Image: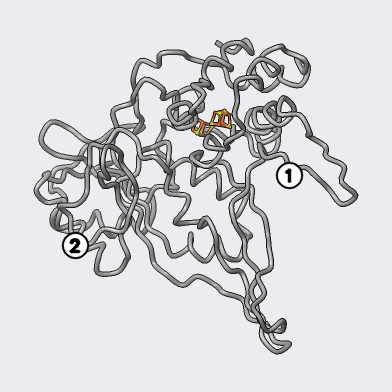
Amino acid sequence: MGKKIKKENLEKLFADIGKEYKIIAPIKKRENYVFAEVEDFSEIVLDYPMTILPPKEFIMPYKEPIFVFENGEFGEVIPNEKIALFALHMCDVNAIGRLDFVFWNDLYYKARREKMLIVGISCKPIETCFCKSTGANVLTNTCDLFLKAEEDYYVGFSMTEKGRKLLSQLYFGPETVYVREVKIDYDEKLQFDIYAIGKRILEDYNNPVWEETAKNCLACTNCTLVCPLCYCFDVIDETFVVPEEGKRIRCWDSCLLLSFARVAGGHNFRKDLKARYRNVYTHKFRTFVDEFGVPSCVGCGRCTTFCPAEIDMREILFRLGGA
Ligand code: SF4
Ligand code: SF4
């Protein structure tokens, strides 16, 4: 069941959320769109096509201290901020739901997620989107409140207690809307049977697509940085001039980097870019599915859009025989 909200009343919803949370929402920056902290509703672009980075940087920052040490003592740095992610597309919401599978028992991730509010909004899929094929086009309870755009109003759907509290405010309703399922429906340009690809990917280990793609790939890691579901990280110690003081840092990493699978003694398990590239797909479409039942890809299209070598993930999936 949903409740209608007039477009002009969204500002009231925003103001209400702002009383309790720091709000992160999509804004325009030069020719692109990014998620950033927003204090005024007028800064938000509600009908944005795609942001460069997904909102993962507000759940697992690019670089964060996990503990500090000083004079033989150490203290954990547990995040304590209440963040509202506002106006997320369905793919980005569901990417967070899939990250939850991996990180829910992580102290730092969980501290942020438990205090977080997620408000989703309708999108207009662009050419590179394939969320339908990955099953990420359907509303799930990762989203506290979802705003489905209609002609001159939105319909709000609450999926959690936090969402229900907002939906009970006077700027929603009184009319109610009944639907069995909320989803983003559109004509996907290339449709895939992602699960069939995943099943075949190891048997088809020497498919020429890996060699050919590796020849063009720059190993720049753009695709993994912009991916809402790439979550590899490294851990480094930063010590200050006084050696008894310092901090342990967690920062993003990428399995496409040469150093990623290098171990003590100098051996590298994935020295060739071909092997590293194949590993990205094997993890996303086979081993993650084996572990959690869904791919670690929501078909947001960012890896294709922001690849400087114009490598298109959909073409590779197509060549792996999944269309
Ligand atoms: S963004 Fe493109 S060129 Fe860069 S690592 Fe990814 S596939 Fe290779
Ligand atoms: S692999 Fe590409 S399409 Fe899939 S979620 Fe990551 S960036 Fe989006």
- Of mark 2 and mark 1, the one earlier in the sequence is 2
Q: Residue at x 62, y 10 (%)?
A: 321
Quadrant containing the C terminus is top right
Q: Where is residue 182 drawn, in percent x and y?
A: 34, 33
Q: Which residue does the numbered mark 1 point to in the structure image?
A: 259
Q: Residue at x 62, y 65 (%)?
A: 249
Of the residues shown, which amino acid type is indicated by label 1?
Answer: Ser
Q: Which residue does the numbered mark 2 point to in the structure image?
A: 15
- Provide the secondary structure element on which disc 1 rests: loop
Which residue extends farthest bottom? 71
Q: Is residue 283 left or right of residue 262?
A: left
Which residue occupies the foreground of this view, 159 or 107? Answer: 107
- Provide the secondary structure element on which disc 2 rests: helix
- What colouring does the structure picture have? one colour
Q: Quadrant of residue 279?
A: top right
Q: Is residue 79 above or below residue 205?
A: below
Q: Where is residue 293 drawn, in percent x and y?
A: 63, 34
Quadrant containing ligand 1? top right
Q: Which label was assigned to residue 279?
A: none
Of the residues shown, which amino acid type is indicated by label 2?
Answer: Ala
Q: Where is residue 159 drawn, in percent x and y?
A: 37, 48
CA gap between label 2 and label 1 equals 46 Å
